[in-house]
Image (spheres, grey):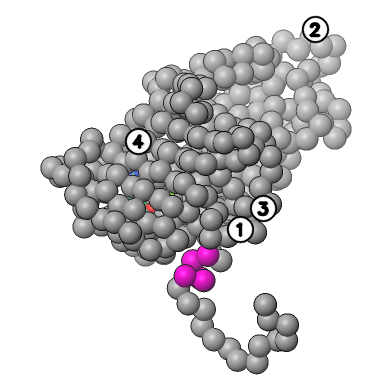
Amino acid sequence: MIEMPNPHIRLLDGDTINQIAAGEVVERPASIVKELIENAIDAKATTITVEISSNRKEVTRIRIIDDGCGIPTEEVSLAFSPHATSKIQTAEDLNTCRTLGFRGEALASIAAIAYVTMVTRSKGEDAGTHLIISGGEILENRATGAPTGTTLTVEEIFFTTPARRKFLKSLATELSRISSVIEVFSLLYPELTFRYLLNGQEKSTSHGTRTLGEVLRALRPDEAAQMIQVSGEENGISLEGYISHPELIRQNTQRILVAVNGRMIVSSRISGAIRSGYGTLIPSHSFPVAVLKINLDPARVDANIHPTKREIRISDEPEFLRFIVTRVKEALQGQDLSHSGISIK
Ligand code: ADP
Ligand code: MG
């Protein structure tokens, strides 16, 4: 405990830097699940299994199993170094980068605050690697037999940062955040299979090779019945998804799911644009339900604003927002809304 301002300026040591950085990426167990699913998707996995274990109070283990490309033996320990990534080489590459990761922070951050075991085998290599890293320190690194792909097990979550651990919500809340992360990825990547097991029991499976509409019907059957398809393409921006009938509204934007280039983002301006498309069809201060997947040239998207990449910046944003408003309006106009007693002007 330092009571007086310290007059000496010093560089922080590597461990301390990692712990501070980890705090930004890994807020809670669900953020670990998000980062690891993103890595599996970037590794071109087709099946991603999320196994969660808990005791009565907290999540005790997170395990993500993927059948993606795996990591070559000589690169496994490097993958856990801060700023180590295979996804970009220069800042310029961000203009063409289509992967969900690029900052090279997730594995280093998770390994800084937990006890992590990775078993991975790269396609084309005969043997895999078994690596244990805890509090940023590699404890074991040896060859092992393994299927192609990667299994990452995270235990003793936040053991190095007890303060963070104290601020976690109830087990039920943390688990519901985890299942909503899995639900979001199932909707955004309907072509992939997601399995979710809690304490060994299957909670949900979203079988791949489906469409967004099919996953929506499977996951949210009540809502899906009141959803209207929306799609469009213009000036290199494409959009597909579902928006709700004006009778299905919410008081906030929580049921608006927007993904840009496969990444879920939070944007009050995009939610506002979707809302604008409804005009007077819905009361002011209310919002529709929506799932929108938008794709555009990565050069127009700056995802490098926040460590969790939840926020993005889009160049020519007014044009982009107008496009969304127009498509939402058009989708609603194509509907027979007469039974709701409201007409679209
Ligand atoms: P980023 O995803 O930003 O590159 P990470 O710390 O999440 O950073 O991962 C570091 C590197 O480890 C990745 O660039 C990738 O090469 C490798 N990696 C991580 N997870 C996986 C995985 N599940 N399958 C294959 N490679 C992985
Ligand atoms: Mg990553």
Instruction: Of the two numbered discs 1 and 4 on the same chain, state the one appearing first in sequence.
Output: 4
Observer-nearest of 341 and 203: 203
Is the CB of mark 4 within 8 Å of ligand 1?
Answer: yes
Q: Amino acid at mark 3?
A: Lys
Residue lying at 80% horizontally and 7% vertically, measured from the top left: 339
Q: Amino acid at mark 4?
A: Asp
Quadrant in the picture for residue 210: top left
Q: Element type at marker 2?
A: helix
Determine the CA span between mark 3 and mark 2.
51 Å
* Residue that badge 4 annotates: 66
Residue lying at 29% horizontally and 56% vertically, measured from the top left: 140
Q: Which numbered dot is residue 339?
A: 2
Q: Which residues are magenta?
A: 15-19
Q: Amino acid at mark 1?
A: Pro
* Residue that badge 1 annotates: 162
Residue lying at 62% horizontally and 52% vertically, measured from the top left: 165
| Figure check: 324 above or below 330 | below
* Residue that badge 3 annotates: 166
Image marks 2 and 1: residues in contact by CB distance under 8 Å:
no
Sort mark 3 into few (<14), some (14-19) or many (20+) by Cα contacts within 10 Å: few
Image marks 1 and 3: residues in contact by CB distance under 8 Å:
yes
Determine the CA span between mark 2 and mark 1.
56 Å
Residue 176 in view (yes/no): yes
Instruction: Of the two numbered discs 2 and 4 on the same chain, state the one appearing first in sequence.
Output: 4
User: What percent of the width, then of the height, locates residue 181?
Assistant: 56, 36
